[in-house]
Image (cartoon, rainbow, N blue to C red):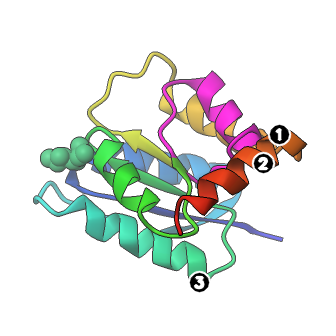
Protein backbone atom coordinates (compact mmCIF):
# COMPACT_ATOMS: atom_id res chain seq x y z
CA UNK A 1 0.00 0.00 0.00
CA UNK A 2 1.40 3.38 -0.98
CA UNK A 3 1.78 5.77 1.90
CA UNK A 4 0.48 9.24 1.17
CA UNK A 5 1.64 12.62 2.43
CA UNK A 6 0.21 16.07 1.79
CA UNK A 7 2.77 18.87 1.52
CA UNK A 8 2.26 22.63 1.24
CA UNK A 9 4.34 25.76 1.65
CA UNK A 10 4.28 29.52 1.26
CA UNK A 11 6.98 31.55 -0.53
CA UNK A 12 9.29 31.26 2.50
CA UNK A 13 9.31 27.49 2.23
CA UNK A 14 9.69 26.83 -1.49
CA UNK A 15 13.20 25.35 -1.41
CA UNK A 16 12.85 23.28 1.73
CA UNK A 17 9.49 21.92 0.54
CA UNK A 18 11.07 20.92 -2.75
CA UNK A 19 13.85 19.03 -0.90
CA UNK A 20 11.26 17.42 1.37
CA UNK A 21 9.13 16.37 -1.58
CA UNK A 22 12.11 14.69 -3.24
CA UNK A 23 13.08 13.00 -0.01
CA UNK A 24 9.56 11.70 0.63
CA UNK A 25 9.34 10.35 -2.90
CA UNK A 26 12.75 8.70 -2.52
CA UNK A 27 11.36 7.02 0.59
CA UNK A 28 8.41 5.70 -1.42
CA UNK A 29 5.70 8.12 -0.36
CA UNK A 30 3.13 9.45 -2.77
CA UNK A 31 3.16 13.23 -2.26
CA UNK A 32 0.17 15.47 -2.88
CA UNK A 33 1.88 18.82 -3.36
CA UNK A 34 -0.23 21.94 -2.76
CA UNK A 35 2.45 24.58 -2.23
CA UNK A 36 3.44 27.68 -4.12
CA UNK A 37 6.49 27.21 -6.32
CA UNK A 38 7.61 30.82 -6.70
CA UNK A 39 9.00 33.61 -4.50
CA UNK A 40 5.89 35.72 -5.05
CA UNK A 41 4.43 36.63 -1.67
CA UNK A 42 1.41 34.58 -0.58
CA UNK A 43 -0.43 34.02 2.72
CA UNK A 44 0.58 30.98 4.75
CA UNK A 45 -2.90 30.36 6.28
CA UNK A 46 -4.23 29.62 2.78
CA UNK A 47 -1.65 26.86 2.39
CA UNK A 48 -2.20 25.48 5.89
CA UNK A 49 -5.93 25.26 5.13
CA UNK A 50 -5.46 23.65 1.73
CA UNK A 51 -3.21 20.96 3.19
CA UNK A 52 -5.41 20.38 6.24
CA UNK A 53 -8.58 20.09 4.12
CA UNK A 54 -6.84 17.62 1.84
CA UNK A 55 -5.50 15.59 4.76
CA UNK A 56 -8.91 15.44 6.44
CA UNK A 57 -10.68 14.38 3.26
CA UNK A 58 -8.17 11.77 2.13
CA UNK A 59 -6.32 8.73 3.25
CA UNK A 60 -3.08 10.39 4.31
CA UNK A 61 -0.36 9.25 6.68
CA UNK A 62 0.60 12.79 7.69
CA UNK A 63 1.11 16.32 6.41
CA UNK A 64 4.13 18.59 6.04
CA UNK A 65 3.98 22.39 6.05
CA UNK A 66 6.75 24.90 5.36
CA UNK A 67 6.98 28.66 5.63
CA UNK A 68 9.87 31.01 6.45
CA UNK A 69 10.00 30.06 10.11
CA UNK A 70 7.51 27.20 10.21
CA UNK A 71 5.72 29.17 12.91
CA UNK A 72 2.93 30.96 11.06
CA UNK A 73 1.88 27.96 9.03
CA UNK A 74 1.91 25.63 12.06
CA UNK A 75 -0.12 28.09 14.14
CA UNK A 76 -2.66 28.35 11.30
CA UNK A 77 -2.85 24.56 10.89
CA UNK A 78 -3.37 24.07 14.61
CA UNK A 79 -6.53 26.23 14.43
CA UNK A 80 -8.14 23.50 12.32
CA UNK A 81 -9.95 20.74 14.19
CA UNK A 82 -8.23 17.40 13.69
CA UNK A 83 -4.80 18.84 12.97
CA UNK A 84 -1.94 18.51 15.46
CA UNK A 85 1.00 20.23 13.83
CA UNK A 86 4.42 20.00 15.47
CA UNK A 87 7.34 22.33 14.81
CA UNK A 88 10.26 20.27 16.11
CA UNK A 89 13.62 21.88 16.80
CA UNK A 90 15.63 18.71 16.16
CA UNK A 91 15.47 14.93 15.66
CA UNK A 92 14.75 14.25 19.33
CA UNK A 93 11.70 16.52 19.34
CA UNK A 94 10.50 15.08 16.02
CA UNK A 95 10.60 11.55 17.42
CA UNK A 96 8.89 12.56 20.66
CA UNK A 97 6.11 14.50 18.99
CA UNK A 98 5.07 11.32 17.17
CA UNK A 99 5.47 9.11 20.25
CA UNK A 100 3.90 11.40 22.85
CA UNK A 101 1.68 13.88 20.98
CA UNK A 102 0.66 11.77 17.98
CA UNK A 103 1.22 14.85 15.81
CA UNK A 104 -0.25 14.32 12.36
CA UNK A 105 1.49 17.30 10.77
CA UNK A 106 5.08 18.46 10.94
CA UNK A 107 6.27 21.94 10.02
CA UNK A 108 9.63 23.35 8.92
CA UNK A 109 11.11 26.80 8.42
CA UNK A 110 12.84 27.44 5.14
CA UNK A 111 14.78 30.40 6.57
CA UNK A 112 15.81 28.67 9.79
CA UNK A 113 19.33 27.38 10.51
CA UNK A 114 18.69 23.90 11.84
CA UNK A 115 21.31 22.21 13.97
CA UNK A 116 20.12 18.85 12.57
CA UNK A 117 19.54 18.31 8.85
CA UNK A 118 15.79 18.98 8.36
CA UNK A 119 15.50 15.79 6.29
CA UNK A 120 16.88 13.83 9.24
CA UNK A 121 14.36 15.60 11.48
CA UNK A 122 11.65 14.49 9.07
CA UNK A 123 13.01 10.93 9.08
CA UNK A 124 12.96 10.85 12.88
CA UNK A 125 9.28 11.82 12.79
CA UNK A 126 8.42 9.29 10.07
CA UNK A 127 10.28 6.42 11.71
CA UNK A 128 8.82 6.98 15.18
CA UNK A 129 5.58 5.31 16.27
CA UNK A 130 2.60 6.81 18.09
CA UNK A 131 2.93 5.21 21.52
CA UNK A 132 -0.32 3.96 23.00
CA UNK A 133 0.34 4.81 26.60
CA UNK A 134 -2.39 5.71 29.09
CA UNK A 135 -0.75 8.96 30.12
CA UNK A 136 0.01 10.08 26.56
CA UNK A 137 -3.53 9.25 25.45
CA UNK A 138 -4.97 11.15 28.41
CA UNK A 139 -2.91 14.25 27.60
CA UNK A 140 -3.83 14.09 23.92
CA UNK A 141 -7.52 13.73 24.84
CA UNK A 142 -7.22 16.78 27.13
CA UNK A 143 -5.53 18.71 24.33
CA UNK A 144 -8.31 17.80 21.88
CA UNK A 145 -10.87 18.91 24.49
CA UNK A 146 -9.42 22.41 24.16
CA UNK A 147 -10.74 22.53 20.58
CA UNK A 148 -14.33 22.48 21.86
C1 LIG B 1 6.62 35.26 5.01
O1 LIG B 1 7.39 36.39 4.79
C2 LIG B 1 6.82 34.75 6.43
O2 LIG B 1 6.22 35.63 7.31
C3 LIG B 1 6.23 33.37 6.54
O3 LIG B 1 6.84 32.52 5.63
C4 LIG B 1 6.39 32.72 7.89
O4 LIG B 1 7.71 32.74 8.32
C5 LIG B 1 5.47 33.15 8.93
O5 LIG B 1 5.45 32.63 10.07
Secondary element type, mark 2: helix
**The quadrant where residue 109 appears:** top left
**Does the CB distance between marks 1 and 2 fall below 8 Å?**
yes
Question: Badge 3: few (under 14), some or many (20 or more) residues near its Cα, within 10 Å?
Answer: few
Q: Secondary structure at mark 3?
A: helix
Residue pointed to by mark 2: 138
C-alpha span from label 3 to label 1: 29 Å
Q: Secondary structure at mark 1?
A: helix
C-alpha span from label 3 to label 2? 26 Å
Query: Is residue 90 covered in magenta?
Result: yes
Residue 116, x across and y down, in percent? 51, 20
Q: Position of residue 12 (x, y in %)?
A: 23, 47
What numbered label is drawn on residue 57? 3
**Dot 1 crowding, Cα within 10 Å, few <14, some 14–19, many 20+:** few
Quadrant occupied by the N terminus: bottom right
Instruction: Return the x and y of residue 24 as percentages of the image width and height.
Output: 60, 52
Q: Taking 5 as reference, is 124 above or below it?
A: above
Q: What residue did someone put label 1 on?
A: 135
The answer to whether residue 6 shows anywhere in this view is yes
Q: Which residue reaches farthest right?
A: 133
* Front position among marks 3 and 2: 2
Q: Judge from the rendering whether residue 1 lies leftward or rightward of residue 27; answer left or right.
A: right
Q: Which portion, as a residue range, is magenta?
A: 86-105
Residue at 28% in and 64% down:
45
- Seen from this angle, which residue lies furthest left? 40
For marks 3 and 1, the one nearer the N-term is 3
Q: Mark 2, residues whose alpha carbon is within 10 Å: few (<14), some, or many (≥20)?
A: few
In the picture shown, does residue 145 fall above or below 12?
Answer: below
For image coordinates 45% across by 46% down, the residue present is 107
Tell me residue 52's x, y (percent): 48, 70
Disc 2 residue lies near ligand 1 with CB under 8 A: no
Question: In percent of the image, x 26 and y 57: which residue is there?
Answer: 10
Amino acid sequence: MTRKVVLANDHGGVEIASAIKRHLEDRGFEVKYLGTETSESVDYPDYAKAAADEYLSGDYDFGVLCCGTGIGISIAANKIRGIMCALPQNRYAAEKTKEHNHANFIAFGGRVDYHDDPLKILDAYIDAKCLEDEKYNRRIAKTLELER
